Image: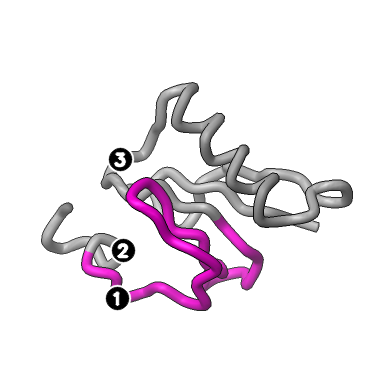
Amino acid sequence: MKNDCPLCKREEITRKYCENNKVWVVDCKTCGVPMIVWKEHKPTVTDEEKAYMVKMANILFDMRDKKIDDRMRSLPDHYHMHIRG
């Protein structure tokens, strides 16, 4: 946890779909679509961590007409991926 990070302090969490010890699944504050956020304060994740996030997306959302967008725009310090329809 980084003391000045709003996400680490959980100040900017919007609608929450679920949370566990690895990720938050919330609506993006900027664009409103669901996103999966890696809780650890870091801008990149391992292949295994990314696979876990993709697995969470497939469990929580009907991904048939959606795509994963992991281009980080507004939250550069927490790796995240948007679920876009």
Residue at x 65%, y 45% (from the top left corner): 69
**Which residue is denoted by mark 3 in the rendering?**
42
Circle 2: residue type: Leu
Numbered circles on residues, count: 3
Return the residue nearer the eye: 7 or 31: 7
**2 or 3: tag closer to the N-terminus:** 2
Count neighbours of disc 2 (C-alpha within 10 A) and say few if under 14, some if 14 to 19, many if 20 or more.
many
| Mark sitting on residue 84 | none
Dot 3 falls on a residue whose secondary structure is loop
Foreground of the two, 39 or 80:
39
Q: Nearer the viewer, residue 74 or 39?
A: 39
User: Where, by quadrant of the figure, is residue 61 drawn?
Assistant: bottom right
> Is residue 51 inside the magenta stretch?
no
Judge left or right: residue 5 versus residue 37. left
**Residue at screen point 55% across, 68% down:** 17
**Which residue carries the number 2 mark?**
7
Give, as a single range, the part of the protein colored magenta.
Answer: 9-35
- Alpha-carbon neighbours of circle 3 within 10 Å: few (<14), some, or many (≥20)? some
The C terminus - image quarter:
bottom right
Q: Is there CB contact under 8 Å for labels 1 and 2?
A: yes
Numbered label attached to residue 11 = 1
- Quarter of the figure with residue 79: top left
User: CA–CA distance between discs 3 and 1?
Assistant: 18 Å
